[in-house]
Every structure is written in structure tokens, then in C-alpha cells.
RNA sequence: GCCCAGGUGGUGGAAUUGGUAUACACGCAGCACUUAAAAUGCUGUCCAUUAUUUGGAUGCGGGUUCGACUCCCGCCCUGGGCACCA
């Protein structure tokens, strides 16, 4: 019996594979079907590969091997996102050039990946900081520039004092710099932008074309934040002077315009400064503005209560009803979204309601929820419709804590009735008196607002359009009047508890009010029928949006949360922006023949607040030499997300120095078939990549819409207690240590076995031994299991082994295809357990044929490539197991001939019987009825119904 | 507050997508081997009760169904993300 020495085996094969070049593929061989399996390439940090990489890359490595064995030409490349801040910060600290650290780190990463048995061809890698790569990043910038997808503007941007650089809005995390954690301040700075917003709609719509996790799609849609609405101008008047100005607001609810009872400007809104002379409480206003500016984002989050200041001395005019309304500034309105100003409709917006309540502003209802009854009481087209006011009276007896209900043929409800006059309280009291006799009621309050409903009234044979109100009364005493006989016949009254009301009610309008009664007053934010809106009364919200916008001369528009992508960085270690400026300051694209526009090396790293490239003598001289005296280069470099937005387009043709990718390879390899990576890239990287592909298609560089046809995320790797790994917690686990102790094969298999790919994995060192033992068993016992007789290879007296084997092939194949690795590994374990069970005490009996064992090794190979290769060789094979074909399973053999099925009585398992595969229901049923335990449970009772689920169960209903 | 994901033994998790809940693995207990330990092998392991049995369990409460971890309604809790999006 040999000892399983994982270190020796893994080293041996890693060297051998390298020598044999088993990873090489012919990228021009288009005879086979292609499969493009992509990993999110890492940033080569000084800390080396982490456990998250290990899981994700193992997952894709298994898939790659599986696809390859299935006859696909598989591209499974790896590379390095090697521009970025950490290398530069390290250079500032140590003086070591990023070029050097990057090279070192890449070498470390490569050796770590190799030690895990990850099969990448590193001759075909992409390194974003190499001129061979970034010349094409620059070339693409040029194409975007020529096609009007790039522009320069000065803007207030987030500024990180520590990094001395600007940061895109999308890259600010909690008010802090995503990369270094320093508080962000605002600074006015010129920079280049990509017009990602041009593609906002396509970025939403095309998500339908890809197989991505639903939550990732949802998140992207929310990030883009499309909302349709209208822009409407409000006139602003001053009390002091005749000066008039306009405020443009964006609203998604122009239908609520008649209910706008105040306006709010963002404190930063330009108009606030313009109105300075007119505002009589400028001191207060100014203070609020400066308070807002000083507030960090975190402070704003904690202070949940609405704040604001009224602009005294100015009024706005609601364009719909010409009413004067007050104007406020408040920090709940953001300068960057919409127009930085809102019309506030407290009756139909929760934030506005909260604000209005605090500042004592009118709340004016303009939308009534609308219920159209369906089914038996649905409106009948042929009948006339009668409009009437309806009041519902909720009457409570406080002493008994019960509610007054009416019961009649068509159901149960609160006291309800038509109203003739205007006094709803009196009318409701009259209804209660007439129908129940109670006469001493105290009116407490109105419940909710107006509600409209349309229903067919059977007893009157007419449609009724009800305008509902609901009032709440409490009973003062139990004094009653006699009820008129005819009322008594119609219905009877009763008192029920709160719990019972829920079950009793069957009228939708009353259920609506009952909910508000119990859950408290809430703002109605849905759509409905317009009320209190003059000639627009009765219109649907949707229709009214258009009509009211038109009426006040507004414009229907679409607004997005997404903003254009700021790509300028005042950093050294990034891709230089290929732009030069004429002596007059005119920006000009550097022509293609001068690319790559190389990053200069004579640069001091110390941050000065200007771009480090401004330091370079060489760069200045180069510029003047090519373009003439007085010309200056752009000193900013590009956001590293630009580099990673197109790297997958380069892999098919990394050595091409004529094009970023040849036409034929583009056509064959692109787009990516399966992309695996962390969910943390849901917003930026994935969105930017999609934008790139869309922009490039528009320019004519590509002919597909989406870069990644199928996307799956791997979960986070946590420590054994379920906590995130972090340097500060000191719980970081190094993959190298694990490989050293347990071997790459065990680390790989355990990583995938511990949890479903998309779930979090808790890295528990105690549990990995299970996988280690599993592999060790295989290594130790395989020579006991087989007969080394190749002539004999397909003859096996033990039929059961064949059946188990084919079931396992089937299960593992399907599981890999669906990325359900945890159950794939589990079924491989089950196979080994079964073999061990079969072993018994007849050790001279050969359990499997060589052919069967080799088949098993092949399906284990993607998970544990080293140990399988070693055993494979020991069995006398000369070629690598990884060049073998994936075993096919025989559907017949994978199926059981007999099944143990459950016999249920009324859904409870009472017995089990064994059946033949395909046995008919009648025969099974008869045999089940013979079963002693079934007989006992049936006790002569009649079987009313029998439900048979093929090969699973028989349920007898008695 | 909003959005997303999730809640199954002591632990990680499985369940053919509405059909025998708890596969596989860890741990634990017992036994064997050993001078002993480790390793290994075997047996047991959801809970309660009982010789065999019978109940009860998939966060909690309802509902649909012959049948619910799975679907619907309401609540509770955990993790992650976002920051008042008009």
C-alpha cells in the first residue's frame, strides 16, 4: 500500500504539464465548437492570491476541463489588471518603481496559480500595464473620441486628499475613497468623460438577452435608475421687487401637480444664490447651506429627521392652480439628481409628507385610490352607471373592544350607506341609527382619504361608482332605538372582535379602510383617479400625467440616476490619455502611429496635487518633438476600470500588433460564454464592460451587444466563524499554506464541496480532512479494486458497479454543467463509499475492471487533476488523463430496475414496497393494499382516491 | 428607511424544482486493531416516547393541496449592499 504524498505528486505533475504544454490550444482551429470561459482577472497585489480567487478560479478550472474533455475548443485565459493605486502608493512609500513591484507580484500570482493546478497558458496572458496592451486601450479611447463618445468638462468631483486624485461617483464608498478609505471632499477639476448615459436604455433592455443571476440584473437596473416623468417650470416671485425667475423641477408624478403645496431646492442650487437679494432671512439660509456642505455623507445618514429652511420673501406659483406656495431649501433634495429642485406633494409622497408635517404645510389630496371590482360584481357594460357618495362607519364599543358589523346575504361589512348631503358625520350617524338602532356615537376621526370604486349593484341592477369616505366612531352608551322592520329583514347587526373582522370583511373598499385603521395613517403613493384637480378630476393618473404636463407647458422626459463616467485620474500608474494640447490649449487626439503613447519613467511619485506626469521631462520633450513647440501632453491617466472594460476582447489574439483582435478570431471566440467572478463587481466593472461593447458595436468594431452571455458569482470565503477575512482581524487564510498542508487537490475539492458556488464558504480547516481522506482512500485502494487485465476490460460479474458508475457519470456531468459542484463532489464520494461497501471480505475478488476505474478517474480529474494523473500513469497510461474524452453514460444503466416506493395514507408515509421499474399503477396499488401495515391503517375504510407518482410514491386517500 | 440574498440536526450542507426531509462531509459516542497514542476500520448519531411503536420537527403564524423545505398571505430574525432619486 502506497502512501499518498500530495506534495511529491503535485510538484511532479505541475512540472510535467508545463513541459508537455498540455494547456496549449490552437486559437485558429475553428473546426471544433468553441467555448470561452472567463475569470475576472486579479489585481496583482503584494499580498498574493487570496481565498476568494482560489474558489472562483477553481470553479472555472473545473468547468474548463469538463468542456475540453467534452470536445470543445476552450479558451480559458488569465491576466492581470496591473495598473492601479496600491503599486503607486507603495512606490511613494518605498521608492521602488511600480514596474518592478508589479512584475514581482505577477510572478508570485502565477506561481500560486500553478501550485493550485490551475491550467492557464501564461504565454497568452493579458497585462494591462504593458504597452502592448495599453496601446489598444489608447486606440479605443481614440475611437470613442472620434465617435463623439468622449468629452471634457470641468466639474465638481470627489477628491481624495490622501491619493491626491479625483474619484468617480460610482467609486466612492460611504463618503470615503474606495481604495484608501480617506474622506472625500468636493473639488472643481477638469476631466474626460465617457458618454455611458447615451446607452442607458440599452444597458437596461439588453439584460434580457443574457443569462445572469436575477439579483445582479435587478441591481444594475436600479443603479441605472431610469424614471419617466416631466420637467415643469414654476415661477418664483419676490415680495420686495418685481423680479421673477423660473425654477425647473423634475417630477415622476405630474398628475399630482394640483397637490403641490411647496417647493424645495437643493441647498447647492444656483437659484438660491441668485435670489440672495430677495430672501429676507439670508442669514439663516446661508447657515443652513454651510451646515449642509460641512456635513459629511455619514452625518447626513445618521440625522434621519428632515431639516430645511424656508426662503422668506419669495414665493413660487403652482402653474396648475396659480396658488402661491412657499419655497424651502432642504438637504433631502440632491443637487445632482434631476434638476436639483422638486415640487413637493405631501399628500402623495412620504418624504414630502414628513417634511410638511414638521413645517406645518398644507396637505392636499389629489389622487384617490381606485378599485374596480372583478368577478360576480364586475361592472356590466350594458347597465347605466350611477355616481354616489358613500360613507363607511367603523363603530367600536370601547368597553367590549368590539366592532359593529352588518350581516346580510351578500356578506359582512361595517355600516355603509349612500350620502345625500355634505355632512358626512351626520349622514353616517343616521345610517347607524337606521340600521342598528344605536344613537349615541362620538365621532373620533376620518380614516384615510377618498377612495373610488366601481361595482355592479345586483339588487338595484345598476353599476355604481362610489366616492368613499370612512369615519371612525366610538359608542358612548348602549342606548338604542327600535329598528324599522324592513331594515331588520335586510340585515342583522352584530359585534365582533378585531381578529374576527379580518375574516368577516368581504368588500374591497372596506378592507382598504380597515387596513389603514389598523396600520395607521399612511400616505397614498400609488396611482388612481384625480380629485381636487378641476377639469382633470376623474382622469386616471397615467392619462393625467400627460394632460397636466401639457396644460402647464411642461415637457415629458426621462431621467437617469446613472451619470457619465469620469475617467481622468491625477495618477502616475495608469494608462496615459492619448491627448495633446496645442499652444492655444486645443485638445487633439494623438494619431495612431504614435501609439503606444508610453508612460514616462522619469517621474517623482510624491503627491503634489497635480498629476505626476507633469514632472516628466521626457514626456514634454517627446510631445514637442512630435507636435511642435508649445504643445503639451495630457498629464492625467485613465481610470483602471477602462483597462478592465475590454480585456476579454484581447485574449483571443494577445500577440496581435496590428489590431486589438483579428476579425476571424473575434468572430470565432467572442463573446464570452461563461464569466465567473465576485458579486462586488455588479455595478462598476460589469456595467462599464457592457458599455464598452455597446459603444464598440456602434462604432462598428464588434457585432454583438453583450460581452458576457452567462454570468455566475462565487460567494465570499469567510473564516470558520463566518466572519469576513481581513488583515486587521488577523484571520486571513493564505491559500499557499493550505496547499502545502493538504495539497492542491484537497483544497480544490473542498472549496467546491463545502457550499454551493454562489453561497458563502466558511473555511473550516477541520472539515477539509473529509475530502483529504476521500482522495487518500482512492489513492491507497485502487490497486485492490481492479484486475490489471486489459484484455478482460469490459467483463465484470458485478453488475451493480456498472449501474453505480453510470449513475455517477450522469450526476457529475449534469452537476458540472449547472455549476453545482458541491453535489458533484458528494456523488463522487458516494461512488467510492459504494465500492468500499461492495468490497466485503472477498479480497481476491476483483471489484472493478480497469475500464471502470479509468472511467471514474476521468470524471474525478477536473476536481483533483494531480492525483488522478498519478493513478492514471500507475495504471500504465502514457498520455495525460486530461487529454481524455469525457465518459458517456448509458441511460439504461444509470436507471434502477427496482425502486423502493413510499405508500402514504392521507399523505403520511405508512409503509414501503419494492416495485419493478415501469410496473403499472394498478398492480402497485393492489400490492399496496395487501401490505400488512397498510391494511392496519385502512381498517376497512374505503379508498376514495389513489395518487401515484412514478417510481416515488403511492398516496391512498381515505 | 429602501433593495437583494437567506433561515433545514451539534456544524457545513442535500432534497429529482409540489412527491419517502435530513444525501455527502465534519464532529461526537461506542467497539476493533495497539503496550499506549495517532492513524485506520466497523457501528450508531434530528427530537420525544416506546422492546416492536407512535408522535413532532425545515425561523414563527395562517392559507392553497391528496401531499408544502418548495407555492400564496402576514410577521420575526440573520447577512450583504445603497443612502432621502422627486
Image (cartoon, grey):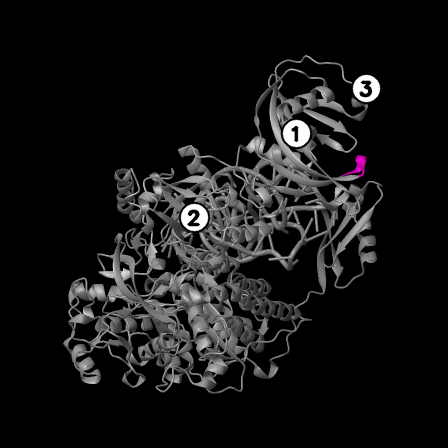
Query: Element under label 3?
Result: helix
The location of residue A740, given as percent across then percent down, is: 34, 65
Residue A914 among magenta residues: no
Find the magenta span and give its range: A457-461
Q: Which x, y percent locates residue A507?
A: 69, 36
Chain bearing mark 1: A
Q: Does residue A181 appear to the left or right of B10 in the view shown?
A: left
Q: Local crowd at mark 1 within 10 Å, few (<14), some, or many (≥20)?
A: many
Crowding at dot 2, Cα within 10 Å, few <14 / some 14-19 / many 20+, comes out as many
Overall secondary structure of the magenta section: helix
Identify the mark nearer the N-term, 2 or 3: 2
Whether marks 1 and 3 lie on the same chain: yes
Whether the residues at callouts 2 and 3 have beta carbons within 8 Å, the answer is no
Crowding near pointer 3: few (<14 within 10 Å), some, many (20+)?
few
Real-space Cα distance between discs 1 and 2? 39 Å
Q: Which residue is mark 1?
A: A392
The circle drawn on residue A234 is 2
| Chain on which label 3 sits | A
Tell me the residue at 41%/74% (across/down).
Answer: A648
> Residue at point 21% right, 63% down?
A89
From this view, report whether residue A306 is shown above or below residue A686.
above
- Using the rendered image of the protein, determine whether residue A864 is visible from the camera's viewpoint: no
Is A842 positioned to the left or the right of A566 in the image? Answer: right
Residue at numbered disc 3: A485
- Pick the residue in front: A356 or A46: A356
Amino acid at each position: 500500500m502506497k502512501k499518498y504524498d500530495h506534495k511529491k505528486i503535485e510538484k511532479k505533475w505541475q512540472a510535467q504539464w508545463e513541459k508537455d504544454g498540455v494547456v496549449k490550444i490552437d486559437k485558429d482551429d475553428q473546426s471544433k465548437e468553441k467555448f470561452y470561459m472567463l475569470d475576472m482577472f486579479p489585481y496583482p497585489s503584494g499580498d498574493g492570491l487570496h481565498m476568494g480567487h482560489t474558489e472562483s478560479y477553481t470553479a472555472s478550472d473545473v468547468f474548463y476541463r469538463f468542456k475540453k474533455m467534452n470536445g470543445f475548443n476552450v479558451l480559458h485565459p488569465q491576466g492581470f489588471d496591473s495598473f492601479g493605486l496600491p503599486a503607486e502608493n507603495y512606490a511613494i512609500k518605498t521608492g521602488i518603481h511600480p514596474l518592478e513591484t508589479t512584475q514581482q507580484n505577477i510572478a508570485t500570482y502565477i506561481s500560486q496559480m500553478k501550485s493550485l493546478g490551475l491550467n492557464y497558458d501564461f504565454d497568452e496572458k493579458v497585462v494591462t500595464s504593458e504597452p502592448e496592451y495599453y496601446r489598444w486601450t489608447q486606440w479605443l479611447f481614440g475611437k470613442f473620441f472620434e465617435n463623439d463618445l468622449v468629452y471634457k468638462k470641468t466639474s465638481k468631483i470627489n477628491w481624495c486628499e490622501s491619493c491626491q486624485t479625483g474619484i468617480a461617483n460610482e467609486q466612492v464608498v460611504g463618503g470615503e475613497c474606495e481604495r484608501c478609505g480617506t474622506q472625500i471632499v468636493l473639488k472643481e477639476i477638469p476631466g474626460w468623460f465617457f458618454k455611458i448615459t447615451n446607452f442607458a436604455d440599452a444597458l437596461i433592455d439588453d439584460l434580457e438577452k443574457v443569462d445572469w443571476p436575477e439579483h445582479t440584473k435587478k441591481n444594475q437596473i436600479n443603479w441605472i435608475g431610469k424614471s419617466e416623468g416631466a420637467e415643469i417650470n414654476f415661477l418664483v416671485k419676490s415680495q420686495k421687487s418685481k423680479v421673477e425667475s423660473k425654477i425647473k423641477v423634475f417630477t415622476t408624478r405630474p398628475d399630482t401637480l394640483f397637490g403641490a403645496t411647496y417647493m424645495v431646492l437643493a441647498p447647492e442650487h444656483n437659484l438660491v444664490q441668485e435670489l440672495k437679494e430677495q430672501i429676507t432671512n439670508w442669514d439663516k439660509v446661508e447657515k443652513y447651506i454651510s451646515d449642509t456642505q460641512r456635513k459629511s455623507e455619514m452625518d447626513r445618514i445618521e440625522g434621519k429627521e428632515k431639516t430645511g429652511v424656508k426662503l422668506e420673501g419669495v414665493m413660487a406659483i403652482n402653474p396648475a392652480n396659480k396658488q402661491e406656495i412657499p419655497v424651502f431649501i432642504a438637504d433631502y433634495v440632491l443637487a445632482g439628481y434631476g434638476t436639483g429642485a422638486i415640487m413637493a406633494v405631501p399628500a402623495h409622497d412620504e418624504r414630502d409628507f414628513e417634511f410638511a408635517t414638521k413645517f406645518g404645510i398644507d396637505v392636499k389630496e389629489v389622487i384617490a385610490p381606485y378599485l374596480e371590482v372583478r368577478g360576480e360584481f364586475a361592472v356590466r357594460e350594458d347597465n347605466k352607471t350611477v355616481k354616489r357618495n358613500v360613507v363607511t362607519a367603523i363603530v367600536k364599543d370601547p368597553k367590549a373592544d368590539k366592532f359593529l358589523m352588518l350581516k346580510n346575504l351578500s356578506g359582512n361589512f361595517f355600516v355603509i350607506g349612500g350620502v345625500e348631503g355634505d355632512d358626512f358625520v351626520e349622514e353616517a350617524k343616521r345610517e347607524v341609527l337606521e340600521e342598528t338602532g344605536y344613537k349615541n356615537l362620538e365621532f373620533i376621526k376620518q380614516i384615510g382619504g377618498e377612495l373610488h370604486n366601481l361595482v355592479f349593484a345586483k339588487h338595484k341592477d345598476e353599476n355604481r361608482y362610489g366616492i368613499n369616505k370612512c369615519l371612525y366612531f366610538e359608542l358612548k352608551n348602549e342606548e338604542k332605538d327600535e329598528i324599522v322592520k324592513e331594515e331588520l329583514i335586510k340585515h342583522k347587526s352584530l359585534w365582533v372582535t378585531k381578529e374576527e373582522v379580518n375574516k368577516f370583511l368581504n368588500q374591497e373598499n372596506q378592507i382598504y379602510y380597515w387596513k389603514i385603521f389598523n396600520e395607521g395613517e399612511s400616505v397614498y403613493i400609488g396611482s388612481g383617479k384625480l380629485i381636487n384637480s378641476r377639469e382633470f378630476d376623474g382622469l386616471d393618473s397615467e392619462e393625467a400625467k400627460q394632460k397636466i404636463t401639457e396644460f402647464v407647458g411642461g415637457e415629458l422626459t426621462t431621467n437617469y440616476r446613472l451619470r457619465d463616467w469620469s475617467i481622468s485620474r491625477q495618477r502616475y500608474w495608469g494608462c496615459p490619455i492619448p491627448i495633446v494640447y496645442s499652444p492655444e490649449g486645443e485638445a487633439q487626439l494623438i494619431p495612431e502611429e504614435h501609439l503606444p503613447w508610453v508612460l514616462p519613467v522619469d517621474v517623482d511619485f510624491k503627491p503634489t496635487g497635480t498629476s505626476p506626469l507633469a514632472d516628466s521631462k521626457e514626456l514634454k520633450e517627446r510631445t514637442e518633438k512630435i507636435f511642435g513647440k508649445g504643445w503639451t501632453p495630457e498629464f492625467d491617466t485613465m481610470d483602471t476600470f477602462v483597462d478592465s472594460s475590454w480585456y476579454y476582447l484581447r485574449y483571443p489574439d494577445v500577440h496581435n500588433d496590428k489590431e486589438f483582435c483579428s476579425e476571424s478570431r473575434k468572430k470565432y471566440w467572442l463573446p464570452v460564454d461563461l464569466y465567473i467572478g465576485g458579486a462586488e463587481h455588479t455595478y462598476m466593472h460589469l456595467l462599464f464592460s457592457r458599455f464598452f461593447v455597446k459603444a464598440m458595436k456602434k462604432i462598428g468594431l464588434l457585432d454583438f451587444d453583450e460581452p458576457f452571455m452567462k454570468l455566475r458569482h462565487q460567494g465570499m470565503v469567510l473564516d470558520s466563524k463566518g466572519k469576513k477575512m481581513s488583515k486587521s482581524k488577523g484571520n486571513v487564510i493564505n491559500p499557499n499554506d493550505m496547499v502545502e498542508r493538504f495539497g492542491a487537490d484537497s483544497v480544490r475539492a473542498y472549496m467546491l464541496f463545502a457550499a454551493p458556488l454562489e453561497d458563502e464558504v466558511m473555511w473550516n480547516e477541520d472539515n477539509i480532512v473529509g475530502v483529504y481522506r476521500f482522495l487518500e482512500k482512492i489513492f491507497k485502494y485502487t490497486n485492490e479494486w481492479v484486475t490489471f487485465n486489459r484484455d478482460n476490460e469490459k467483463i465484470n460479474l458485478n453488475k451493480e458497479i456498472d449501474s453505480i458508475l453510470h449513475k455517477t457519470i450522469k450526476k457529475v456531468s449534469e452537476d458540472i454543467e449547472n455549476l453545482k459542484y458541491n453535489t458533484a463532489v458528494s456523488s463522487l464520494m458516494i461512488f467510492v463509499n459504494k465500492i468500499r461497501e461492495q468490497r466485503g471480505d472477498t479480497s481476491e475478488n476483483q471489484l472493478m475492471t480497469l475500464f471502470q476505474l479509468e472511467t471514474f478517474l476521468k470524471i474525478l480529474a477536473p476536481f483533483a487533476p494531480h492525483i488522478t494523473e498519478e493513478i492514471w500513469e500507475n495504471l500504465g497510461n502514457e498520455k495525460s488523463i486530461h487529454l481524455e474524452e469525457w465518459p458517456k453514460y448509458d441511460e439504461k444503466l444509470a436507471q434502477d430496475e427496482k425502486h423502493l416506493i413510499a405508500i402514504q395514507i392521507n399523505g403520511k408515509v405508512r409503509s414501503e414496497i419494492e416495485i419493478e421499474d415501469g410496473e403499472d399503477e394498478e398492480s402497485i396499488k393492489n400490492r399496496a393494499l395487501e401490505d400488512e401495515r397498510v391494511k392496519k391503517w385502512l381498517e376497512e375504510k374505503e379508498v376514495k382516491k389513489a395518487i401515484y407518482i412514478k417510481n416515488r410514491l403511492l398516496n391512498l386517500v381515505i
